[in-house]
Image (cartoon, grey):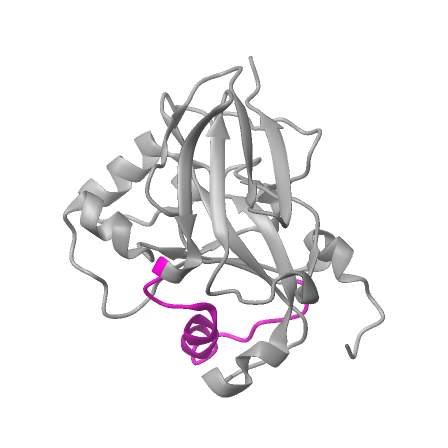
Amino acid sequence: MSSSRSLNLFHQFGKKIIGIGMNYRNVAKELGAPIPNKPLVFLKPTTTYITEGQDIRFPPNCKEMLYEIEFGVVIGKRGFNISRSEADSYIGGYCVTLDMTSKDHWLEANKNGHPWALSKAFDTSTPIGRFIEKSKVSDPTNVQLWLNLNGKQRMNENTGDLIFPVDYLLEYITQYMSVEEGDLIITGTPPGFDTVHKGDVIEAGFKNIDSIKFHVCKN
């Protein structure tokens, strides 16, 4: 790594979060939607990060908020026009990530052809776990993701179902924008996403690798 900064603190110095929509085949199947022919890319600010011990909060004018677990990829060094064959060398590690979504704002934006910003970029919408060393994930195309809501399993899917795997995403994204050390790519939600309520407890993780636990604020 060319920088002396520790990727354990990526959320403190990374400049952006790059999100991918509709990236699991089983989600497209569940929604009756066509398989995308290219990644659906959106951005979130780093002000959305929270870590364990901090609560998830509903944004204003949101009655329904969705939970989504995502396979987070932490960038290890700056890159532009990265090829799939060299993509792995730009990956610094991984992170269990939740992408919370305001369903109300998302539906309104989709209906009117407007950007998703308010539905995805509100404060506390990106709960994250600890930085996971790259060596702890032997095969990013075979990681089992799971999520429990109030102790009951709601999501259980493997990254092998991704439409666009991590190396493809890095090649595609960096045709348009540079990635930098500490940036996070969240690769899309598996099926099973649904609404949370105030006071709920979300536990999620990568099987046999790492897990997180967050509370939804009661107020």
Camera-side residue: 134 or 125? 134
Q: Position of residue 71 (x, y in %)?
A: 51, 54
**Placement of the N terminus among the 4 image quadrants:** bottom right
Camera-side residue: 56 or 151? 151
Quadrant in which residue 139 is drawn: bottom right
Q: Residue at x 43, y 71 (%)?
A: 169
Answer yes or no: is residue 112 visible. Answer: no
Magenta-drawn stretch contains 166: yes
Q: Position of residue 150 (x, y in %)?
A: 50, 20
Magenta-colored span: 161-182
Q: Residue at x 16, y 58 (%)?
A: 34
Q: Residue at x 44, y 18 (%)?
A: 197
Is 37 drawn above or below residue 218 in the view shown? below
Is 82 drawn above or below residue 122 in the view shown? below
Q: Position of residue 69 (x, y in %)?
A: 47, 43
Q: Is residue 186 left or right of residue 9?
A: left
Q: Position of residue 98 (x, y in %)?
A: 52, 42
